[in-house]
Every structure is written in C-alpha cells, then in structure tokens.
Image (spheres, helix red, strand yellow):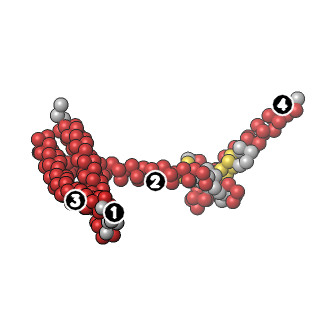
Amino acid sequence: MRKNLNVRRNYEKQLFSTMIVMFALSGLTLSGTAQARMKCWTNNEGVRECGNSIPPEFAQKEHQELGKGGIVREKTERAKTDEELAEARRLEKEQAEQAKLNAEKKKQDQILLATFSNVSDIERARDERVTALEATIKLTQARNDKIQLDLDKRIQTAADAERSGKVPPEALLEDIESLNRQISNNDKFIEGKRIEQEEIKSSHAADIKHFKELKGIE
C-alpha cells in the first residue's frame, strides 16, 4: 500500500514538473528575452525543472537552454570530476607522446630512404664502418704486442735482480705496473670496439629489413 502511494506521489511530482515546464514555455512566446534565459535541469530527485537561472547546486550538472517552442537550443554537459580530468590529461599526454614518436619514426624513415638508394648501399656503409674499426683494433693490438715485449724485458730484469739477491729498483717496478695497466686498458678498448662492430652489424641488418619494407622489396 505504501509502495503504491510513493509511486503515485512520484508520478504527481513528474506531472507537476511537466506542467510547470509547459506553462513556462507558453510564456516564452510573449517575450524574446525570456526565451534566451529559459534553462532546464534535473534536480536531486530526478525531476526536470526549468527557470530563468540555474540554482547554484545544479550549475555544474548537465543542463539545457531552450528556444522557441521548447526546442533545445544549447546543451551543456556536466562538469567532469577531478578523476575524469586527470584521466583526460593522461590520455592527452599519452597521445602527444605517441604523435611525437610517430613523427620521429617518419623522419628516420625519410632519412633512411634519402641516404641509401638500394640494399647494396647499406651493406657497403656497414662494411666500411666495420673495416675502419678493425683497422683501429689491429693498430691497438700491435701497440699492445710492443708493450708486452717491453714488459717481458723489464720482468726479466727484475727476476734477475731477485735471483742475485738484490731488490729490483723501485722505478723498474713502477714501469712494470704502468705497462701492465696500459695493456689492460688497451684490451678493454679492443673489447669495446668488437662490441661496436657487432652493434653496427645488427643496426644495419635492421636498416636493411626496414628499407625493404619501405620499398616493398621481398
């Protein structure tokens, strides 16, 4: 019984609200100024209300401005929550970053196509870089071999001094330590150049693959 009474009351509220809207709209035909001010919104009970101004508590919610004959002239969406605004900013930032990546990728593609005419050009550029590094490696290795010979001589001199019961000179021991350090540094340098060679090969292999994709080559 009470449930039916509540339903009836809600129906009466909706009917009353509708009548108010219709009455207000009928008044609009008498004044062009009133038309511009007529706005409608939904209250906290879900009932549609209309008037010349929107109550402050509903100003941030969805509302409409009506024109002649009750036709919706302008619709204002509800204000977004802080969470929705934060998500919108995140998506905007993500899209901007993706657009930047796409632009950079396009730029690199253009450079690749402008730099090389065919796959052979890429292979030639690869081989030239690898060969140049190989020459540097060989030069460093030759320097190491020479240092090693000098080191062996100094080690032999120190060993002869010890066998004769003498203490090797401090300067000799410092030279031995310095030469060992040079050889170690050169070995690391050579290792780095070997890694660089492999990186060049890998990079050019990727360039060749992508060049073929851009050119439609099988």
Mark 1: give few (<14), some (14-19) or many (20+) Cα within 10 Å: few
Q: Earlier in the sequence, mark 3 or mark 4?
A: 4
Residue under pointer 4: 4
Query: In which image quadrant can residue 122 be found?
Result: top left
Tag 4: amino acid: Asn
Residue under pointer 3: 153
Q: Are marks 2 and 4 in contact (CB under 8 Å)?
A: no
Residue 162 visible in the snapshot: yes
**Quadrant where the N terminus is found in the figure:** top right
* Discs 4/1, front: 1
Residue depicted at 73% across the width and 40% down the height: 15
CA gap between label 3 and label 4 equals 112 Å
Mark 2: give few (<14), some (14-19) or many (20+) Cα within 10 Å: few
Residue depicted at 70% across the width and 57% down the height: 57
CA gap between label 4 and label 1 equals 119 Å
Residue depicted at 73% across the width and 48% down the height: 44
* Image location (x, y in percent) of residue 50: 67, 52
Q: Earlier in the sequence, mark 2 or mark 4?
A: 4
Q: Against 38, is 18 above or below?
A: above
Mark 4: give few (<14), some (14-19) or many (20+) Cα within 10 Å: few
* Discs 1/2, front: 1
Q: Are marks 1 and 2 in contact (CB under 8 Å)?
A: no
Residue under pointer 1: 165
**Furthest residue in direction front, as rendered:** 164
